[in-house]
Amino acid sequence: MDYRGPYRVRATEKPHPVIEHPEDCIVRVTRSCICGSDLHLYHGLVPDTRVGSTFGHEFIGIVEEIGSEVQKLKVGDHVLVPFNISCGRCAFCKQELYGNCHESNPEATAVGGIFGYSHTAGGFNGGQAEYVRVPFADVGPTVIPPDMDPDDALLLTDVVPTAYQACEMGGIKKGDTVVIFGAGPIGIMAAKCAWLFGPSRVIVIDHIDYRLEFVRNYAPCEAYSFKEMDDVVEFVKKTTDWFGADVCIDAVGCEASGDGWQTLTGRKLLIQAGSATALHWAINSVKKGGIVSIVGVYGPTGNIIPIGNVVNKGITIRANQASVKRLLPRLIEHVQSGRLNPKGIITHRIPLEDVADGYRIFSEKMDNCIKTVLIPPSAKR
Amino acid sequence: MKNKIIDATKIIGWGVDADPENEPTYPIKKYTGDDHKRSQWTRPSLQPAKVEILKSTERPYLPAVFGTPYPPRALSGVFRRLAFTFSESMNRRWLLLILADRMDVVEGLISDVLHARFPNLVKERGLGVMLKHKPGMFARKVAIRLVILGLIGGIVYYNKRKNNL
């Protein structure tokens, strides 16, 4: 996969990646996904996205080559690779903040290294390719349990951990009402994961009808279109005895629809770091003293949000990139026990050679697309 | 006036209400109590920088690993280097990077042509699949572009005529 500019990608031959650090390994990719946050790159919204870059931070594959200091992995292992690149020994990794590693991103301190997510996230090539260089091979990559479906493993690299951590950060208690903004893959999976924490109601709000229908059945949960509401916040208040939700989750991020002013300033004019409509709604919909959990991706500059209401309502805001490595043992258990069925959200399988079509289908929400998997040519042989 | 070094432990009441159990970031963060020894870890081996790596001004040295593809190049590279002289807190850093990204697109097109590779814009933009699944959207996008091109053409034509009069 080769990024050529906003809304332009192609499949092309590139040099085979090489070991550049003694703790690297080279993985032959067997499957990768297009993530909702890849669309921010595809749309040209992430600064320092250089032409020629290969995206893709959700992938699994076979270890083909290991560096001289790699001890735990061996050639031939089938591994799932968390999207965060983490050293496992800096102050942040030691506190299990694997998404905040201090040894994997020279270009920005606000985020750790991420595969295929621009030079703002370290400048690493991603997994929408046949081969990929994976740093710190003994830290992130995890051997896929033999009884696990590779599609489930693929979604454990980002979607499930991000959705689960959104719920965890929400501090959901038994009996709570949880409102999730966004019915993309993360929002759908967050609705599924939320039940693991014991709420009495899970409500998803979006405007794409086929996705609302999907999450209503998959999670299962209540799902509403904001197109049918006069005022989203008033709707949430009304449905929660006029108090507001206990927990609100922003699973949309910087490309939210629903507010013309936010869309104009955040997505068209780029004078704020994306459209913060979902976050705005989350802050205003949560109860006093409630928790807003953010996993939607925003840019590095500023956003227009009602911060005064955060103060006056005593809201706790919690946010982070998912700490995939920390969550994997528990999530593998959930998948193996059947409590979570990640592969159920996959709707499209596309050859890597047709990556441009894959991006366009996902970006424009065509053909009832929820989650797209890319299959490299070498995986088909 | 010079700031004095303060020994916090000498301040009356220092730490009396400190509660290590009150850790609002748990479980995202495993509280180890080591926050203030944070710079003392054994660093991994360091990747040699064989290409130009731009480094944030908010860190003193390169991290142990980094991506090496696509070092800064051409005019976009000049703007990227300039951007990296500002901290991550400055909007101008990010705006310069966005500007560099757009220049890079043009440089990419030039590079394609110089390497005798003419980009298939219909394929690269996934327009075929859009025509198949959302012909209405496809038609709307084409119409909008035609209107914009028509307007630009009209303005150019009008100015040319005006100058010729």
Image: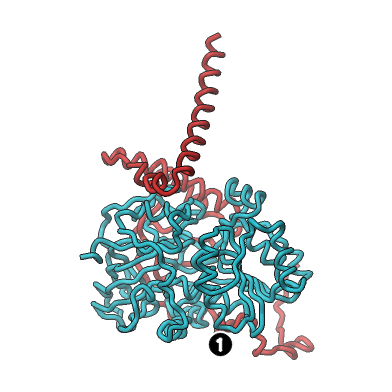
Chain colours: A cyan, B red
In front: B115, or A365?
Answer: A365
On-image quarter of the N terminus of chain A:
bottom left
Reading the image, the residue beneath label 1 is B32
The reply to whether residue B105 is in sight is yes
Q: Is A77 left, or right, of A157 in this rendering?
A: left
- Name the residue rendered at 53%, 78% in the picture: A193
In which quadrant of the rendered view does residue A26 lie?
bottom left
Q: Quadrant of residue A165?
A: bottom right
Work out whether A161 lies above or below A358.
Answer: below
Q: Is residue A134 above or below residue B75?
A: below
**Residue at 41 percent of width and 71 percent of height:** B64
Q: Is residue B85 above or below residue A141?
A: above
Three-letter amino acid code of the residue under disc 1: Thr
Left or right relative to B12: residue A3: left
Give how far across and how far down residue A350 sits, in percent. Answer: 33, 59
* Residue in view at x 48 percent, y 61 percent: A36
- Which chain letter matches label 1? B
